[in-house]
Image: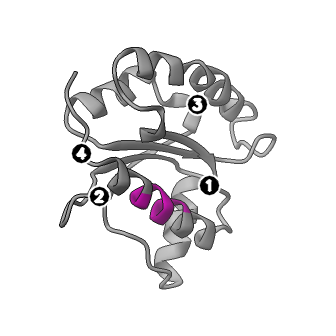
Amino acid sequence: MIEGYQPKIIGFLCNWCGYAGADLAGTSRITYPANIRVIRVPCSGRVDPLLVLKSFQRGADGVLIAGCHPGECHYVEGNYYTRRRFALFHPFLEYLGIEKERFRVEWVSASEGKKFSKLVSSFTEELAKLGPRREA
């Protein structure tokens, strides 16, 4: 871990659950690191893998996608597309020289503000241990 290093996290949060969970954490005064930059998307299924790659290309140390729990998507099956699409993504990241620990897909409901807080905190700690991402 590098002294004073703060990782940059890009978070693609589903409007209905991930973003609402982050909002609940904020309104409930549940603290979490300010390292995350939130991008609100209508559904986690709308996150294109190229957006994730572009985030890393532009200097993100980690990328988080947070969506509704499987079976609870407001767009019926958007999170199933997310799960399927990004299940194959970790080997591709490793091929590009990006550690798989720098990317996460998580399910957070609108009522799980505490879970969102713990998720961002643990992801920040994990990225701090990895250190800054090196360009390949």
- What coloring was used for the rendering? one colour
Q: Identify which amino acid the numbered label 2 is placed on.
A: Met
Which segment did they paint magenta?
Answer: 119-125
Question: Could you tell me how far apart the alpha carbons at marks 1 and 2 are, in whole angstroms?
Answer: 32 Å
Mark whose residue sits in front, 4 or 2: 2
Q: Mark 4 = which residue?
A: 132
Q: Identify which amino acid the numbered label 1 is placed on.
A: Cys
The numbered dot on residue 45 is: 3
Task: Name the N-terminal-most of marks 4 and 1.
Answer: 1
Residue 109 screen position, x and y as percent: 68, 58
Q: Tell me what residue is drawn at x 60 percent, y 73 percent.
A: 114
Please determine whether, in this image, residue 113 is positioned above or below residue 42.
below
Q: Mark 2 = which residue?
A: 1
Q: Mark 1 and 2 residues: CB-CB less than 8 Å, in contact? A: no
Mark whose residue sits in front, 4 or 1: 4
**Can residue 27 be seen by looking at this rendering?**
yes
Task: Name the N-terminal-most of marks 3 and 1.
Answer: 1
Q: How many marks?
A: 4
> Within 10 angstroms of label 4, few (less than 14), some, or many (20 or more) residues?
some
> Within 10 angstroms of label 2, few (less than 14), some, or many (20 or more) residues?
few
Please determine whether, in this image, residue 57 is positioned above or below residue 126.
above
